[in-house]
Every structure is written in C-alpha cells, then in structure tokens.
Image (cartoon, rainbow, N blue to C red):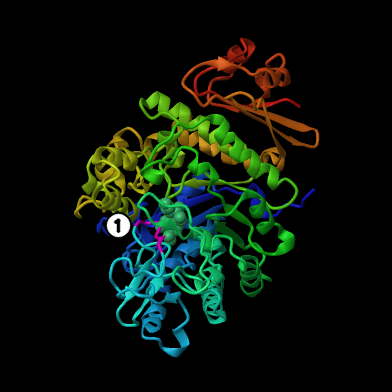
Amino acid sequence: AQSHPWWANAVVYQVYPRSFQDSNADGFGDLVGIISRLPYLAELGVDVLWLSPVFVSPQEDNGYDIADYQAIDPMFGTLADMDALIVATHELGIKIVLDLVANHTSDEHAWFQASRTSEAEYADFYWWAPARPGTVPGTPGAEPNDWGSLFGGPAWTYDEQRGQYYLHLFSPKQPDLNWENPRVREAIFAMMNWWMNRGVDGFRMDVITLISKRVDDLGRLPGTAGSDVPTLQAGPDGFSSAVPFSADGPRLDEYLAQMRREVFDGRDGALTIGEALGVSSPRAAEITDPQRGELDMLFLFDHTGIDQGGPAGKFSVRPWKVSDLRGVFERYERDTAEHGWPSLYFCNHDQPRVVSRWGNDSTPALRVRSAKALALLLHLHRGTPFIYQGEELGMTNAGYTSLVQYRDLESVNLYAQLVHHAGTVSHEEMMQGLAAMGRDNARTPMQWDDSAYAGFTSTRGNGPWIDVNDNYVELNAQAQRTDPDSVFSFYRQLIHLRHSEPVVAIGDWQAVDTDTEVYAFTRRLGAQALLVVVNLSGEAVALPPTSSELIGEPDPSRILIANDSDDDVVAALAAGRLEPWSAVAYQIA
Ligand code: TEU
C-alpha cells in the first residue's frame, strides 16, 4: 500500500489565458481577467490552477514558443500582475502551477539568436546538422533527413546565418533545445527555481518526455557513413515522425532526477506534471514512482487516439468503442496500482471538447446528460482529475464552418499540407476533420454569461481573437451556477466527493463486465466499495451481469451520485436496464 501525498485527492483546473477573461477590451484574455474570475474557481472547489503559458512569446503557437521565460507577455499583463495572481490564488487556498515549455524555445529567444551565430556559450544549445551530402543547402530535399514536424512539413529548417539546419519537432519557430548540454539544463533549472522562489507551486511540463534525444541516430543521419536510421512511420504529409528519436530517450530518467534534486528537493507541497508524448503506461508508472524522484504524474495520450487515424492523420475520425476507452484506462490503472500515480483527463487546449467527441451535443438535454455521464466516469477513477476551462459547463466544439475562423497553426498548416501540397485529402474531408478534432475547438472564449461575446470581452473593443461559440446564449456559467441540475453543479458534487470520500480518491480500481460495451468498474478501500456503471450510448442497454449481481436489490440510499433522480435510477436498475447516457456510482459495501 502506498502513502498518499496531498494531490491524491486534489482536482486541477486548467486555464488557457488567452480565452479565459479579457480585462482591457483588446480581445485577448489576461492575468487581471483571471484574477477577477478566481471566486468562480473557488466556488467550483478546485485545488490547483494550471496556467497555460503567459511568457514573452511571438505567439506562433499561442505561447508554447517562449522568447523569455522570466517576463510576462504584455498581451497578458506584467510581472506585477503575475505576482498578484499568485497571492490571490493562495489567499483562496488554491495552488498555482505554471506551464514549463522546455523541450524547445522560440527562435526569437536570446539563446537561439546567439546559437545561430555560433557564439561560443550558446553554439550547442540546439540541434544543428549539415545538409544532406551532395545537395544544395536550403533547397527542398537537402534537409539532413526526412523527419517531419508534428505541425506539418520537415522537422529541419535551414539557417542562412549559421549555414546549417536546426531541428524542430514542432514549428520552425520552436527549435528543440539540446539537453545533452549541461549548460542548457543549468539554465532551465535556474529559471524554474526563480519561479518557485516567486511563489508558484510547481509546473506542468510541456512534452517533457521528448527532452532526451537518441543522439546516436542523429550521428548516423541518412547519407552519412554507417547510416541505419530506422525508417519511421510516415505521417499524413509524407514525412516520417521524429518522435521516436526523442520520446522517452536514454537520459530522460537522469534529467528528471537531476531536475528533482536541483529544483524541487526541500520544497514541500510542490507539484510536477509531465506531458508524456510517446511514453507507455508501464514506463509512466516508473517515472511517477516516488521512490525514483522524477515526476508526480504524467499525461498519457493513448486514449486520445482511439477515434483518430487515416489519410488526414489525427484529423481522420474513426469509429470508436467504449471497450477501447475502457481498455486504455484499465492499463493506466493497473500499471500504477502498486507504484506511480495516474492523471485523469479528457480535455485540454489540444483536444476537442469531450461532450462533442464522446458524448452527444445535438440537443441541450442530451448535451447536459452526456456531459454528466462523461464527468462521472472520469472523476470516479483513481488518479488526479484535470478539468479544462469550460468542461465544467459542458462547453462544446466550436462549430466553425469556414477555414478563416481557425487560428491554430497545426490546423492551418496541416490543411495547407494535406489539401494543397500533398492533395491527399479533400477540402470537405479536412473541414470535417478540423470541426471534429481541431485544437481551436477547445480555445473558443469561455462562456460566462449571455451578454455580447459571452462576457469574455467588452463591446468597447473589436471583439475576441477567435469566434465565440454561438451556443453561449443558452450555455454559460451564469445560467448554471444557481441551477442545481446543471453540469457545473454536477462537477461541484464530483469535486466534493473526491475531497470527502477516500474511496473515490485512492480506492483500488477494477474493471467489471469487460466483455460488454457498458463502462463499469469498482472502487474498494478497506470495508468500503463502490460500483460505477456508465452507459456511454444513446440506446438503453441491459445492466450487465456482474454489475447486476453487485447491486442486488437496488436501494436509493446507496446511490452516491447519478445523472438521474434516485427514483429513476432505482426503477431502471430494478428492471435490469441502463437508460441512454445514464451514469451512477453506487455503494455496494
Ligand atoms: O502538445 C504536445 C503534442 O504533441 C500534441 O498534443 C499537440 O497538441 C499536437 O496536437 C499533436 O498533433 C504540447 C502543447 O500542449 C501544445 O499546445 C503545443 O503546441 C506543443 O506541445 C508544442 O509546444
């Protein structure tokens, strides 16, 4: 049995600053806006605020391209505003973690500017490589190899000044840092300590599992002597993926342990969450094992791929099954049962809205009901749940119908690559893919009330940086806060349960009825036991056998939480039936 740290029963809330609350009518959210909305987070009851990047940045990737880690971008405010936000969250008993984007910087960061002129101190801060032998540097096909960027196009860009190519797993404006260089690590750890000393409580670390590169592969680029770089799986735009070169590399554990020692040792109550692209669930259990002193928890990606894949890559929507989703969570839970700790998320700023994706947003009633079913399902798992702004309202996908409404570089670039350059995907297919999977679905302005622009920004300005979802008039925080049957009120109850019921936070997790498409599992802690049964479909289905046995004669006083009235739950269970989109957590002991 493990001993449990404070975050075992905590709930984290992610704020995407540019879309949360604008205070100065420029159409972008800002820090002062966030401060004004903190009472809302306190009312919801969350324990930790995770803030997506607010540092100085050219905003190529909405701040995930940092030009100065120790200054706030003027679009978000000032360092004084940041200090005020730290104080204000702490006054409400909420911790605050920042987004640490340290796999790469912006190409406008001073380190990169110095690196491209080969300035001694910074020459090896990034990954530089010569053109493929026998080619003209800077011309198409002269890239050191055929690795592609995750945002489309090659993963290498030629720099005239240095006369070499630099590596970028993401956009050309996001060069990858060379963590092999001890000075890079020192510089990053010093910056992290500076923020910790300023009062923040930890970091969510962007693609941190990509920091250790397989250096040998780089030394054996195609066309060089002894080359045997594996031909990696081709991406939708024809380039091969560079992720295997970077993901979970040979020195990852060493770097994370060094970071722990140099930044977090002696800082009680700090929280570290790693975004774990390319990491398997058994490895995640190791990395989050407290004995090893690396990270507290990781975001895995397996469940986000169950409905993706095809000619347009992640923008090709595939049918999915409840058993696929359950199977992924079953592995997360099983692998971390003895050591390590899972994080639980459906939504973030990179994923479409879950109610549109795996629920049903076609009518208000179905939307509310399926949003609650998905919320109950996720929040009754063992692990630390993450709520992405607006998820607690059941906010839906953007509903954009025109390419010009999209802002996200991934969506815009891949549209150009696939529809125009490669010609492998039609305009119509790609528009459908963007509407289903595009990242802007999560980035529409927070829907606060039914006033103009959903209360996100003032009518004195030119409107928000990205279109508000039309459904804000009916779907907004103001309408839900005082409604006991709202999605918001349901999330409040779920958060409260995690705080008050240890079985919800730390009880053992076990799937049941796994040969069915009903998502059912038990939670057990000492003499306490819960059964969670969720029907993630629009059809009534039979209550499966093990669940039925565990429930026996249904008793309304045993219902912990459900998205139906107690009477309706009991009636359905007694009839051996699960209504469409029904979800219940039931005390079986
Ligand atoms: O994302 C990592 C990542 O690889 C994906 O989730 C990404 O969003 C993309 O959709 C893959 O198809 C992190 C950040 O969360 C994301 O916002 C950044 O764009 C990215 O890193 C680069 O910093």
Q: Which residues are magenta?
A: 146-152
Q: Which sits in the foreground, 37 or 228? A: 228
- The answer to which quarter of the image holds residue 264 is bottom right
Q: For ligand 1, which image quadrant applies?
A: bottom left
Q: Report x, y in % for residue 561.
A: 60, 28
**Is 36 left, or right, of 330 in this rendering?**
left
Q: Which sits in the foreground, 3 or 577? A: 577
Q: How many marks?
A: 1
**Is 448 left, or right, of 385 in this rendering?**
left
User: Secondary structure of the magenta portion, mostly?
Assistant: loop
Q: Residues within 10 Å of mark 1 (few under 14, many from 20)?
A: many
- The answer to which quarter of the image holds residue 63 is bottom left
Q: Is residue 15 visible?
A: no
Disc 1 under 8 Å from ligand 1? The reply is no
- Seen as rendered, the residue at the extreme bottom is 120
The stretch drawn in magenta includes residue 108: no
Q: Report x, y in % for residue 267.
A: 65, 69
The residue under the point 43% across, 35% down is 318
The residue under the point 53% across, 45% down is 345
Q: Which sits in the foreground, 508 or 285? A: 285
Q: Is residue 90 visible?
A: yes
The residue under the point 29% across, 66% down is 140
When the figure is inspected, residue 314 is found, relative to residue 516, above or below; the finding is below
**Is 213 left, or right, of 2 in this rendering?**
left
Residue placed under numbered mark 1 in the picture: 28
Q: Report x, y in % for residue 572.
A: 58, 14
Q: Report x, y in % for residue 584.
A: 60, 26
Q: Quadrant of the C terminus?
A: top right
Secondary structure under the numbered disc 1 in the rendered image: loop
Q: As shown in the figure, which amino acid type bears the numbered disc 1? A: Phe
